[in-house]
Image (cartoon, rainbow, N blue to C red):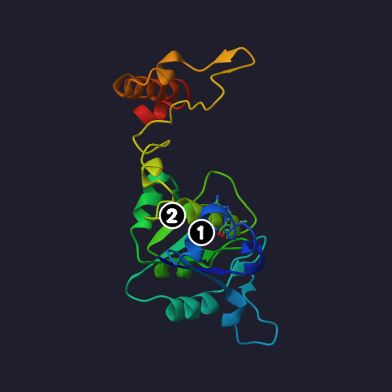
Amino acid sequence: MKIDVLTLFPEMFVGPLDFSMVKRARDSGILNLRVVNLRDYTHDRHKTVDDKPFGGGPGMLLKPEPIFEAVENLANATTRVIMLTPTGRKFDQQLARELAQQEHLLFLCGAYEGFDERVRTLVQDEVSIGDYVLTNGALPAMVVIDAVTRLLPGVLGDDQSSQDESFSHGTLEYSHYTRPAEFRGMRVPDVLLSGNHAEIEKWRREQAKLRTEERRPDLLE
Ligand SMILES: C[S@@+](CC[C@H](N)C(=O)[O-])C[C@H]1O[C@@H](n2cnc3c(N)ncnc32)[C@H](O)[C@@H]1O
């Protein structure tokens, strides 16, 4: 998969996307990631990307011209252009799976008060990572890229692990234990030591359901 990110802060992407599974995906060529500076698409001496809102009000808005030029340059017929914005569709595992099917994603990261409204005509999706407001779109883009990348075939050691985790079956994940079987008086449930795979599977399904009822009943509705 190819992912391009258009941002005012390319330096923020150094580090978070250079470790763990995303690094592995990049190193193996499964993910081709490019972070592009929006200022590269300006043509004035000050590399201006923002301007005051018509009608007044606080803050500055990202101007349409550099964003239109960048998208026209970076996108093609197979590109899904995604605006990161608190007013977008709430990001979840289902959307991560949907995006993981695409050939090319182009993320538009906002800053200041956000985008000139006309930029919306360029995008297929508007995505929010939650009901709170961050300073700019770099962290939201990294969150989405991380969640999507681990779903790409070949990235996780065992592709089954992305099918068995929270949100994959509409429930939260069941409890896990590793060795030792007893630690500070806390014992691993006997069923997990029994070797009876059918019973273990049944116990896990029940645990997942109980935990979901307790913590996230909305998922079961
Ligand atoms: C300070 S925010 C702008 C908030 C905007 N004025 C509003 O009230 O919706 C600047 C940029 O950060 C990004 N951003 C902030 N919070 C976000 C969130 N929860 N999800 C996705 N992007 C977010 C967006 O790209 C946004 O354009």
**Are the two marked residues, 2 and 1, in contact with CB atoms closer than 8 angstroms?**
yes
Ligand 1, image quadrant it occupies: bottom right
Query: Measured from the top left, where is residue 7 in percent x and y?
Result: 58, 68
Front residue of 9/203: it is 203
Helix, strand or loop status at disc 1? helix
**Label 2, on which residue?**
155
Residue denoted by label 1: 24
In the picture as drawn, the residue positioned furthest to the left comes out as 198
Residue 64, labelled with which disc?
Answer: none
> Residue at (45%, 27%) from the top-left corner?
216
Q: Is the CB–ligand 1 distance for label 1 below 8 Å?
A: no
**Residue at figure coordinates x 33%, y 71% from the top left:** 78
Q: Nearer the viewer, residue 109 or 188?
A: 188
The amino acid type of the residue labelled 1 equals Arg
Q: In the drawing, does residue 208 fall left or right of residue 26? A: left
120 shown above or below 211 = below
Query: Quick check: can you spot residue 76?
Result: yes
Give 215 or 117, whichever is nearer the viewer: 215
Quadrant of the image occupied by residue 39: bottom right
Sequence-first tag of 2 and 1: 1
Image quadrant containing the C terminus? top left
The secondary element bearing badge 2 is classed as loop
178 in relation to 86, above or below: above
Res. 80 image quadrant = bottom left
Where's residue 98, x and y in %?
34, 53
Q: Nearer the viewer, residue 62 or 125?
A: 125
- Residue 95, percent across and down? 38, 50
| Few, some or many residues within 10 Å of mark 2 (<14, 14–19, 20+) | some
Note whether residue 53 is visible: no
Tag 2: residue type? Val
Q: Position of residue 206 (x, y in %)?
A: 36, 20
Residue lying at 44% horizontally and 57% vertically, measured from the top left: 126
